[in-house]
Amino acid sequence: MKQNLLDGKALSTRMRAAMRDEVAALSRRHGRAPGLAVILVGDDPASQIYVRNKANGCRDLGIHSISHPLPSDTSQQHLLGLIGELNQDPKVDGILVQLPVPEQIDAEAIIEAIDPGKDVDGFHPYNVGRLTSRIPALRPCTPYGCMKLIAQTGVDLHGKEAVIVGASNIVGRPMAMELLLAGATVTITHRFTEDLAAHVARADLVVAAAGKPGLVKGEWIKPGAIVIDVGINRLPDGSLAGDVEFATASKRAGWITPVPGGVGPMTITMLLANTITAFRNRIGETD
Ligand code: NAD
């Protein structure tokens, strides 16, 4: 089957161009740009790269990004205090705490402390609950980005078999809610699932998000299926790989995302989109 690449980089570039114009118009009308506060606790190198990419994304669009680097021994109380201040700050529309946080900090409590209207990651139980109740507000960025990529295929998901590999709070579970909303018949597989191959083999759409390189074998893919690979795994040789065996899967898939250049750029793009949405909601301009 002819390979059909779902190019997240290209889609991101197109979406960000439109968003740049939108930010310029909003800034002119309201006398200030949307503002995103990014908190990074500690000096994890991967987190530093993610935070830098997010700041660069903001700068490129004209979004005001405010960075809050904190030492790795920051207390939970201090972090909660900062979030409280940012919740009250009228110039801050979005608040993001880069995960993972050091072990002395309870990530759930931190997420719950963020004003849901400023929760641009979409991780707050309020926003997860809104999506689950079919009234989405700020949507979790990675699944939201996956939906934008899937929309590129033009395939109507109503009644399609969708299989998600991975059940995390930030990818697998909200992905299931997005796909249910789009009318798919959804299966969530996880570490206790028996016979993953059989589940994947009947899927018209596979979303892989387990964090295990090559977990999903190319030969399992149903011919013509849409394959969305969320996994980002660093191999011993330093290269990046997804959770799907790309070389074999791409021969069978109707559409497939590459790693890198698939879901990754879309996640940041949707974070920027959520920041604009949060700004619009806060100033009461929702058209
Ligand atoms: P996680 O570790 O929180 O969750 C992994 C999930 O995979 C768990 O639910 C686990 O039960 C499941 N799993 C493990 N082994 C399995 C198996 N054999 N069969 C089926 N399910 C299995 O991970 P996460 O935070 O959801 O991230 C998953 C991957 O996605 C990682 O590689 C991460 O780097 C990547 N990621 C990418 C982006 C992006 O923007 N592209 C965003 C978030 C996460």
Image: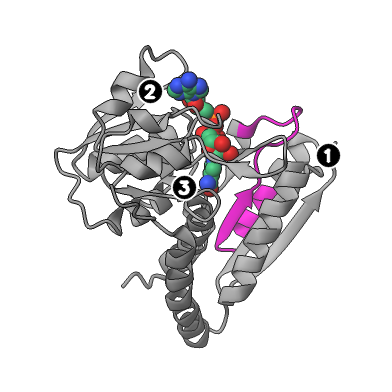
Is 75 placed left or right of 270 in the picture? right
Q: Is mark 3 on a helix, strand or loop?
A: helix
Image x and y of residue 237, in percent: 72, 39
- Front position in the image: 7 or 124: 7
Mark 1 highlights which residue? 72
3 or 2: tag closer to the N-terminus: 3
Q: Which amino acid does label 2 sit on?
A: Thr
Q: Which of marks 2 and 1 is in front?
A: 2
Q: Which amino acid does label 1 sit on?
A: Ser
Residue 142: image tag: 3
Task: Please give the name of the residue rendered at 25% of the width and 38% of the height, measured from the top-left corner.
Answer: 223
Task: Please give the name of the residue rendered at 61% of the width and 51% of the height, measured from the top-left corner.
Answer: 96
In which quadrant is the C terminus drawn?
bottom left
Q: Which amino acid does label 3 sit on?
A: Thr
Magenta-tinted stretch: 82-107
3 or 1: tag closer to the N-terminus: 1
How crowded is the residue under tag 3: few (<14 C-alpha within 10 Å), some, or many (20+)? many
